[in-house]
Image (cartoon, grey):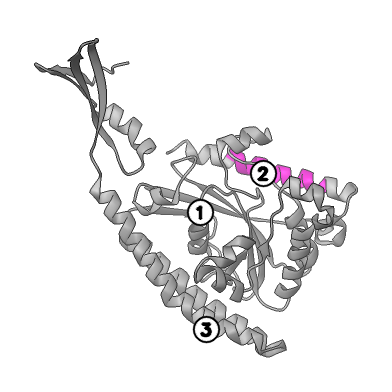
Amino acid sequence: MVQTDAHLQKQPDELHFVAHSFEEQLLEPLAGVVPVAFFELSQRCDESGVRLDLHPLIVYNPDHLIRGLLTILLLAQNLALWGIPVLTVGMLKFVTFGRARRRVILALARLAEGWVGGNNRVFDLMLPVKWEIEGLDHPIRKEGHYLIISNHVSWVDIFALFRLFHGKVEFLRFFLKQELIWLPIAGQACWALEFPFMKRYTPQYLEKHPEKRGEDLKTTRIAMERYRTIPVAILNFIEGTRFSEAKRQEQRSPYKHLLRPRTGGLSFVLASLGDQLDAMFDVTIAYPQRELTFWEFVTGRVPRIIMHVRQIEIPAEFRTKAVTEHGPMRGRFKKWLDEVWREKDALIERLTVFF
């Protein structure tokens, strides 16, 4: 199909198909930072007759490429600047206990906040993104215990949420896959900062080793016991994975922009810290792209990021151990969370209408 804003140029030995604005806009998201400028159709003759060969002629966008590489370089330098001190101070956890260990963990959190501040300066310097924040305009007591839930679209979410709550609550902690502990500097720094690492098992493995079922909930319980002694903000992506349309269809999710929420980990957080939680915040993140890569972000191709925050009142019945057990309470908890998620889905629909 040839659009009206494209044309064929006839020359003695060649046919050139020149793509203009429509084709470039269509193809650029598919090609990343390598927009397709035009295709060349070469007409050649041999003994069998006429053969047409399609040759893609690629034009690189140096602005995107340079911006992305520089941004990643600056982020890596900032990670080394703050991550190495975190690792060094973190070694003290092996020889400290009680109040002394608590002071070490709090000192590590201060260093980690320096890392967040450095990332924010890199983004402000290198990227044209406009951060639009709604609903977090009232003061929050920083030295408290907070639970934060959010939809999950991309690795960008983590940097966006750190930016959102920077200086307002204690340094965010969230659940990580156990394999990430081997990520240079970052993985070991997360260990020092008391991030809980979760080991994921495949359904096939669990069939052979049923004793491993519930290990992630056990890890959650242990982490929550540690958090009772320090001020903390716990971030939980309760969908369990990043959103994609393919995953949504596979799950047969009843939501248009979200995957089904998982209740297991969240219920253990509420049961373990329910009496200490000062507030629960629901964050809705919306991007122009429904599915976003980190590379698109660091190359400056995300013009706006919207973050909407609302405080949710946790019913008293869900702050008890009963919420983790099978029974009527668990059913009411799932119904309550489903309503929270339906409201979030409708909000994303309204926010993305303006992109």
Determine crowd level at label 3: few under 14, some 14-19, many 20+ residues with C-alpha closer than 10 A: few
Horizontal and vertical percent position of residue 201:
71, 53
The label nearer to you, 3 versus 2, is 3
Q: Is residue 200 left or right of residue 268?
A: left
Residue 341 numbered mark, or none: 2
- Work out whether mark 3 precedes mark 2 in sequence or the reverse, and give the earlier one: 3
Horizontal and vertical percent position of residue 206:
78, 50
The amino acid beneath tag 2 is Trp
Residue 243 or 30: which is nearer the viewer?
Answer: 30
Q: Is residue 177 visible?
A: no
The structure residue drawn at horizontal position 47% and vertical position 49%, both measured from the top left corner, is: 306
The residue under label 1 is: 155
Residue 341 or 133: which is nearer the viewer?
Answer: 341
Horizontal and vertical percent position of residue 30:
38, 36
- Work out whether mark 3 precedes mark 1 in sequence or the reverse, and give the earlier one: 3
Which region of the structure is painted magenta? 332-346
Rounded to the nearest angstrom, the CA distance separating label 3 from label 1 is 27 Å
Assign a secondary structure to mark 1. Answer: loop
- Work out whether mark 2 precedes mark 1 in sequence or the reverse, and give the earlier one: 1
The label nearer to you, 3 versus 1, is 3
Q: Quadrant of the C terminus?
A: top left
Q: Is residue 278 visible?
A: yes
Horizontal and vertical percent position of residue 91:
59, 84
Residue 134 or 158: which is nearer the viewer?
Answer: 158
Q: Residue furthest right?
A: 327
The amino acid beneath tag 3 is Thr
Q: Is residue 56 left or right of residue 307?
A: left
The structure residue drawn at horizontal position 47% and vertical position 78%, both measured from the top left corner, is: 84
The label nearer to you, 2 versus 1, is 1
The amino acid beneath tag 1 is Trp
